[in-house]
Amino acid sequence: MRFLGERLHAAGFTVSGILLAGHRTTVEDLKTKKWQDWYQSVKEGYEELRVSCKTIFVSGISMGALLAFLLAYERKSDVAALASLSTGFFFDGWNTHAWQRMMLPFVIHTPLKYFVDFPEGEPYSVKNPSVRYDHLGYPVFPAVSLSELYKLMRTVKRILPDIKVPTIIIHSREDDSHSLRSVDFMERHLGSTVKEKLILDNSYHVVTVDYQKEKVAAEVIRFFQRFAEDPSGTAGKLCHP
């Protein structure tokens, strides 16, 4: 999210990039974290930003977008607008296989989750090979953390109809993790009366670093500026790194 944050800052927004619990530490540390721990990081960042910013915008990519939705639900009128990037409610992208989707419940919903790690591999959710290896995270995705992600997905699914915040949904047609089914789900169930959609055609899952990152940033800025009380001044932007 750094690139998007830098573009927002250049456009006059105050930007806070949140480091979620268990991230940029160790895999073993990540395994100890619940989804509530990730959300606690978001809430702390939000409260810090509120001290200096009157208007708050939220954005996140993938799991971070789920957390952004949860914040918008809890804070309601305090959030002016939301940018949902590569949000997934179903693991059905082209780089997921049928046997993996069939086996997953037997792992994440049983004690096996404490002993299994899923290796990360090509293309690392980035289509552009020139930047594909610049933003690598952990080499594995622990099953126990994937179980927490599923719990977060279910939580956000239930509250989507009660989220009224203006939202722009940005997703790639070639997302390797989540197909456009997730976009259709959000369009049908998100309670906001102001919804915009941008479908990219030359990116994978991590749209904030891929070929169309400039387009993503421009659209998020344009959408947020629609709801800024002072378009020429400073508003708050809360994002997941």
Image: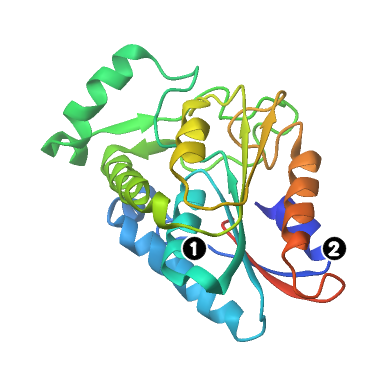
Residue of label 1: 72
Q: Measure the C-alpha gap from mark 2 to mark 1.
A: 24 Å
Q: Residue 24: in sight, yes or no?
A: no
At which x and y percent is residue 224? 72, 59
Q: Is residue 104 left or right of residue 75?
A: left
Kind of residue at badge 2: Ala
Q: Is residue 148 left or right of residue 197?
A: left
At which x and y percent is residue 27? 37, 48
The correct choice, above or below, for 164 with respect to 100 in the image is below
Q: Nearer the viewer, residue 139 or 227?
A: 227
Q: Residue at x 39, y 14 (%)?
A: 97
The correct choice, above or below, for 168 with respect to 128 in the image is below
At which x and y percent is residue 94? 50, 17
| Quarter of the C terminus within the rendering | bottom right
Residue of label 2: 10
At which x and y percent is residue 137? 52, 43
Q: Quadrant of residue 119?
A: top left
Element on which disc 2 rests: helix
Q: Is residue 193 left or right of residue 70?
A: right
Q: Residue at x 76, y 31 (%)?
A: 211
Q: Residue 181: in sight, yes or no?
A: yes
The correct choice, above or below, for 205 with respect to 92 in the image is below
Kind of residue at badge 1: Ala
Q: Residue at x 41, y 51 (%)?
A: 161
Element on which disc 1 rests: helix
The single residue placed furthest to the bottom in the displayed view is 51
